[in-house]
Amino acid sequence: MNIIAADVGGTKTRLIYADTDEPHKVLYEARYPSAEFASFEPLLETFIHDSGSSAEQVDVLALALPGLVSDGSARLTNLPWIIEKQKLIDTFGISNVSFMNDFQASAFGTSQLGEEDTIVLNPGKEKPGAHNNETRVAVGAGTGLGVAWAQDDHGAACAYDTEGGHIDFAPVDDTQVRLLQFLQQRHGHVSYERILSGGGLVSLYEFCAGKQARDDNVPEITAQWVNSQSEINDVADTALTIFVQIYGAYIGNIALLFKPHGGIFITGGIAAKMVEKMQSEEFINAYLNKGRMRTLVEQIGVYLVTNERIGVLGAMSEAVNTQRVTK
């Protein structure tokens, strides 16, 4: 049986074509800019064509999707797409189509990682994956901010998505209080996603530069630009420092909420591009700054995931496991 697994993101979509009997033997893999397609269907059609295969040869389609996902449809966050399961079945003739939240897939994917796929930010008491029956959490800032958790129960993997990125931002010092007030003028309600995301990093740069209104005469500032300027631009460097401080405090909050002794795995496209900052004292001090609960968060391993395929590997892994259970 052949499977297509896809990790659909606001910026890019990664797809894998594999045999369910040999899921680690990838037959074809590709990545596409999501915004170049009006909907998911032409993107999938392009992938199938590029793979040299045909829809008739595909038995299973497993999609990891950003946003609110129901059994039959998904309205995507940060993409103007609505994906409907029945439409995919009718269009491509693939009878077995499954949906899951993208961070639910990342949580599944944590069990697929090797030591070479992560950088240790806080060693904790356990090695990642040493006890898969322990709770594991995937957290990631990218186009948005996602959180999901997983646990293996008697050999069966279970993963659950959350909307933890929309928790209210809680400033911890005077600078962050001013940042909250700055963002309230723009958005009203300020969640952590307003800061810990690509758009959030741009807002941080504008806050540090003292710019409330965006100047249409200035070339567009992106998260990638802010990151690339950090060594030569003091404002960009300050923005990144505040970013990792808030990220560290947020990850510490996640540690307190879940007590995930299987580890916290930081995914998403932003952190992996600022490894030095993520390994800095600013991040780890903010993570550990939990007062009477410092000892607890010290025990939780925190790992920066460098393998960008964690989401699609998780989607494929869960689809393969489901097929084996139903056989």
Image: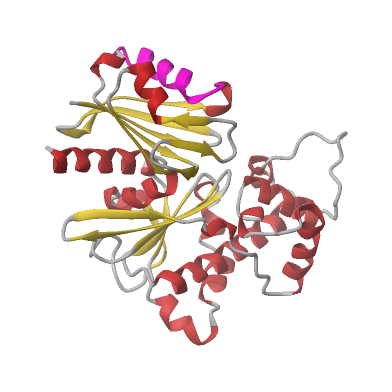
Q: Give the residue displayed 53% in from the left and 79% down from the top.
A: 290
The magenta region covers 37-53
Q: Give the residue displayed 66% in from the left and 54% down from the top.
A: 194
| Front-most of residues 22 and 75 | 75
Residue 2 in picture, x, y percent from top left: 22, 25
Q: Quadrant of the C terminus?
A: top left
Figure quadrant of residue 195: bottom right
Residue 231 in picture, x, y percent from top left: 67, 50
| Vertical position of residue 245 compared to residue 4: above or below | below
Q: Is residue 231 visible?
A: no
Q: Quadrant of the N terminus?
A: top left
Q: How many numbered discs?
A: 0
Q: How is the image coloured?
A: secondary structure
| Vertical position of residue 165 compared to residue 38: above or below | below
Figure quadrant of residue 225: top right
Horizontally, residue 95 falls left or right of residue 189, namely left
Q: Give the residue displayed 15% in from the left and 43% down from the top.
A: 325
Residue 14 in picture, x, y percent from top left: 42, 31
Furthest-left residue in this view: 327
| Front-most of residues 115 and 69 | 69
Which secondary structure dominates the residues rendered in magenta? helix
| Vertical position of residue 104 compared to residue 46: above or below | below
| Front-most of residues 241 and 276 | 241
Residue 179 in picture, x, y percent from top left: 76, 63
Q: Is residue 261 visible?
A: yes
Horizontally, residue 6 falls left or right of residue 273, namely left
Q: Give the residue displayed 24% in from the left and 59% down from the top.
A: 152
Q: Is residue 125 magenta?
A: no
Horizontally, residue 164 falls left or right of residue 103, namely right
| Vertical position of residue 299 compared to residue 163: above or below | below
| Front-most of residues 217 and 53 | 53
